[in-house]
Image: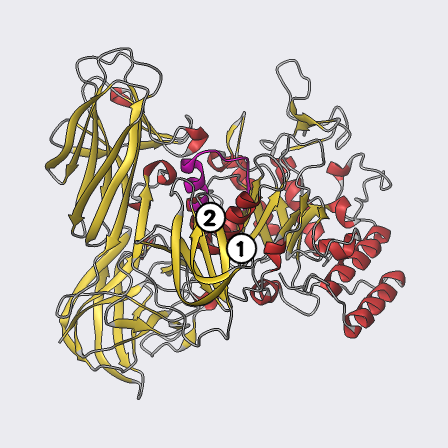
Amino acid sequence: MTMTSSRRVNKLAIIALAIGLLWGLTGISSVRAEHGKTTAQKIADRDFPSIFQAWNKVEFGPGVTGNEIHDTAMHDLYFTSTQGLGLQWDDGSPTNWDNDGLGTAFTQASISAATAKVQALHAQNPNLVILTEIRYWAAWDTYLPADHAWWKRGSDGSKIAAWQGEGLTIYYMDWNNEAFREQVANQAKAAVDTGLVDGIMIDCMAIDEFGDADADPNRVDLIARIRGKIGDKLLLVNSNQLKRPNMAPYINGLYMEVWQSSTSEHMQLVADTLKWAEEKVRSPKINALELWYDNTRDDLYKMRAATTLSLTHGNGYVLFADHNENVNPDHMHNWYDFWNANLGKPRAAGYQRADNELFQREFDNGTVIYNQKGNGTRTITFSEQRKRVSTGASGTVFQVNDNDGDIFLYTGAPPSQIPAPASVMISDYYAASASSAQGNHNWYTQYTDGSTYTNMSWDSANSKLFRFSDQGISVFGEFGGNGGRIDLGPSHDAVLKWVAPAAGSIQIGGSMRKEFGTDGDGVVVTVKKNNTVIWGPTVINSMTPTQLNLQQTVNAGDSIVFIANKNNNLTGDQLRLQPVVKLTPVTPQPGTAESMFASLSAPQAQGDWADKELGIVFSSSVSGKITHLKAYIASASEAGAHTATIWKNSDGTRIGGPYTLNFSSTIGWQTFDIADLNIAAGSAYTLSISTGSDTGRYYAMKTNSMSSGGSNGSHLSWQAHAGVYGTTLGQQPTTQAPYDANYMRDIVFIPD
């Protein structure tokens, strides 16, 4: 939020609004979406919690007045139709919505009216980001002429209904028609060219009766065309709870319109997708999470869960709203006192605690706690007095219910140093993490003949699942609620394999059951650590879940392998296997090797088509030696020779290198041996590794991860804004990385 609950307007804003209205009346096109701030500044300057409005209004709650401008400006992100902004297409029927799909520009009168509205909104909230929806998926029956080629039609030639409700039927449009895709992209350009919006929102990019939008080359092409037309303006797509890897290079965020969720697996998927989007989409990022209530708008626990999930897993926006089956217009909502909490801005990334499995994140003025569904009631203890926002109670020890969350504000002055993280847990759920990329969240989907393990192929054309087609084996990923369902084959076993990203202790949990009934002789399940059996073999032939609860210690690279075997026959051999592995990394001891970012993975691949030195500023609390250098390879294009150098920051001297590092095309961390290099305690150093010679000059970039200082929990640490770059090869990089990026350069350090 940026506005106070009273949403006062200052005199300068009133003057600016009056001038803007005068300009609008005189026909002078002066308003731009920035209104004195760039879009990136609006996103960066807002405080949290940060709430968005999806089309329809807030109705009730503290500070709500019933005035459209005032109430909309309570939010920090607002998207609506072009008509909702007051714009009318100059399409031959500019006084109504007929033939809007043919529009190529807006009437000057409507631009003037929309100008006044946008200026009024920004007068009350200068950080409000405004997007407008451009339709591609479906529309009312007069959006295009009845006989137009851009309607999608059935075998009988009639239009195909996409949705019915609220007295309205909308019909599919034909995104397979290239001319139509070009028209949609041109309409997006016309909208941003008015200067009134920060970008474009595209609805319905999840799964429909025609398949998964992200696997549809024509819909991905549409998104690419829009990006080409709108330049660096924002682009948001509605993906529900799904990742959009093929669209990610073109979009700035996901609008996650998530329905009523009743399972812990679904909430884990929502959290995983939000975290993925914060890492993978373009910057600046505007991920927007909307959850619907279960029974009424007074499901306050669900509102708090949505809000705190958003705050601990990302830097985006949140909304708790009516579901689409409600008789009211979709997305109407209340405003809650909880959203008026003054958290300020994030001071560190969120993490999951190992002691109670709560998610925690530190902000300027307090701490956010999210308790995911299925975790039970948990206790959180602070070292100083806190005020709980949901109840107003003060204390140091609080309980947080299952599928709930809360904000705990400091009662005195915030500390100059944020609390050190508690021991961190990494939870990897197969059903929430499986996707087309093998290795996502350390999971691999394989088959085996008993001796050789082979990765299955991803079948995007058939319900998004892994297949070993020769044997009829299928393993469903995250789509359609089938996460973890295994259909077995006659001669090979299905395998779900988790690989430890670091050394530590693990909890192995989850459930397994037959999917459809008890026919046949059951499925045999075995769990191994590397090649040693640690559970089973056990016959599963019941619809009642069998629960796992195992503890092990692992080294980096160890595997936990779940094997499903058909037993004697294939009758009824469909298994629902939903394992989870929870890793608590071991804290390095003095004298043992350590790195800074061992548990980090999955950055985006960035290509700037220009040479760069990409570095990290770091220091050690004790003296010791650097024995290896590490780099995360995010694109196979990075393969080839790169140059690494280590500088001492106090005088800019080169103390190590230049070293030649030959990257392979394998995605992930790669380690390179160097002659031992001694470094001193308490001194700042810069490790830089150059881009290669590939045309795109690709490199790894994990954004929004260096806004505050941090440490590896042992001896190595880094300052705030520690990611740096330079544009001259061979020179020490000193320019702060955009979007507080981590370029995923690291060392292996052994303390003395």
Q: Quadrant of residue 534?
A: top left
* Residue in the image at 18% along x and 52% along y: 556
In the image, residue 264 lies in the stretch drawn in magenta: yes
Task: Using residue 680 as the reference point, say whether residue 110 is left or right of it.
Answer: right
Tag 1: residue type?
Answer: Gly
Instruction: Name the foreground residue: 233 vs 120.
Output: 120
Tag 2: residue type?
Answer: Leu
Q: Quadrant of the C terminus?
A: bottom left
Q: Are marks 1 and 2 in contact (CB under 8 Å)?
A: yes
Instruction: Name the foreground residue: 69 vs 671.
Output: 69
The 10 Å Cα crowd at callout 1, few under 14, some 14 to 19, many 20 or more, is many
In the rendered image, residue 385, in percent from the top left (x then y), is placed at 46, 67
Q: Earlier in the sequence, mark 1 or mark 2?
A: 2
Q: Secondary structure at mark 1?
A: loop
Give the residues drawn in magenta, as a range: 255-271
Q: Secondary structure at mark 2?
A: helix
The residue wearing badge 2 is: 274
